[in-house]
Amino acid sequence: MFGDLLENSTTEGVFSALVNKVRDWSLQTNNGGNEIDVSHGVGSAVAVEGAFKRYGRVQVLHDLSMDVPKGSIYGLLGASGCGKTTLLGCIVGIKRLDSGNVYVFGERAGGRNESRIGYMPQATGLYGEFTVTETLRFFGRVIGMDEAKIDERSRYLVDLLALPPHEGSVANLSGGQQRRVSLAVALLHEPELLILDEPTVGVDCTLRELIWEHFKSLTGNGGVTIIITTHYIEEARQANRVGIMRGGCLMAESAPAVLMKRHQAETLERVFLALSVEQNQAKRTVGIAARADRPKATGRWPIERGHMKALVWKNALWLRKNLTVLAVVTLLPVVMVSVFCLAIGHSPFDLTVAVVNQEVGFRNCNSTLVCGSEEASCAFLGYLEERGLVMRYFESEGDAIASVMKGETYASIVIRRNYSRGLHVRAYDWQGLSVSELAGSSIDVFRDLSNKHLAIHLQITLYQTFQQFFYDYIESCGRRWEAMKVPVQWEAVYGSMNPNFTDFSIPGVLLS
């Protein structure tokens, strides 16, 4: 029925004028009666005035006004995509209008009246791992109910809606049963205003009648107001008041009997058809209206402690039901950090370096450090081997550098002839050091800088090794090595004097 009357386009500005035309036509056929009476006075539970809502270029609500009296059942009829769900979201406060006003019990829609509203959305929004009882307990805690009241209402609603046993999870229920659980959540805290988006879909006829009888008892005895959308048009005849939507506009609202009498129709389907035909005729004759001003709505969403407690309980319950996920979430970061610490950031070892020792060549030499020794270069190379470097000896400097260029070694170390003699002069008579002795006591190092981490590590290793070697040489000559030390004392405030990359990067790994 509704699908045959969907619009092919939603031309901006047309609906405002065509609704006025429908109103005028209704006034003439009813001898001055008014079909849409909007006010937010004492008798109104919900009042909407001049509502505009747009998603991108699509106009969803256009100059919509409606009035829901207190203590009534209001049936909202319309095709899929006409804006019913968006309108309900604006009344609840989870969506904001571009312009216009929504009043709930005389106050603007929002967080202040959330405890007075029960909302059943089109999508159930339930947690599949929970049982029916656990679901009701969670939402009861969110709304701030005490435990005794939650248990009492849960037992009543399970019996009323013929819900399945408590042990089964919601995910294993049928679609109709899940919608009944969602309806139970909306009814749980006995709200003054019930907003139900297609609550009887997937429900058998007998249970549907029981639900409607419960709705009537709520509005008759408890003064509850109910707004309900439904695909069953004739089902809406049980409502006290019906609003008919199409294309984001409310074409008419009144009691079902009044609408049928006014339009000389036997069913609400005929009423909807007559209004839709009149709307289509008006669209062909009415020009484009001016665009409405749509200021951005602003608001603050306070954080409730009760909500936080309910969410913590919900998450704890979910983790208890998903121990595998809990184990993975707990252990996986530990494993990742452990593997990172084992594999990343440690000082490299067994690095191969090329060595050209022009002082002794390939013959065996004494690596014992003795003051005045002619083979001090051998002692220095022995210090390097103790630091984990692998020596590869070459005859010429060119061959050693070529091995670095080929990637066979990470650096080449060239020790000149008369190195030991120049080193001894540096230690004892550095003021009279000649140019040749200065050059001869220097060690040339050529590095592969394409790998920055390894290059810096080699540089630091050579510096520290030579420093220790030189201090030991001075001490072997009977002098105080502290006198040759750089007169700056370094101390660590945080960390160690020999940090590694793991210590630097592990905080970032933990945070990520």
Image (cartoon, rainbow, N blue to C red):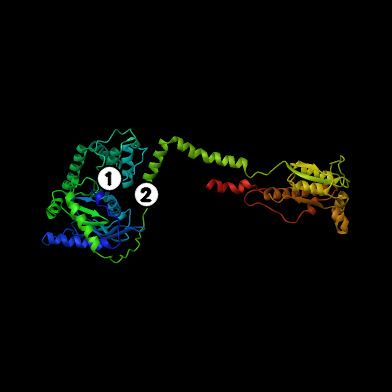
- Distance from Cα at disc 2 to Cα at disc 1: 21 Å
- Point out which mark residue 186 bears: 1
**Label 2 with label 1: CB-CB less than 8 Å:** no
Any part of residue 185 in sight: yes
Packing grade of label 1 (10 A; few <14, some 14-19, many >=20) is many
- Point out which mark residue 305 bears: 2
Any part of residue 67 in sight: no
Q: Residue 334: image x %, image y %?
A: 54, 40
Instruction: Single out the residue that lies furthest toward the bottom.
Output: 290
Q: Residue 215: image x %, image y %?
A: 20, 44
| Badge 1 element | helix
**Residue type at mark 1?**
Ala
| Badge 2 element | helix
> Which mark sits nearer the N-terminus, 2 or 1?
1
- Give whichever of 90, 342 is nearer the camera: 90
Q: Residue 244: image x %, image y %?
A: 21, 53
In the image: residue 164, left or right of residue 396: left
Between label 2 and label 1, give the one nearer the viewer. Answer: 1
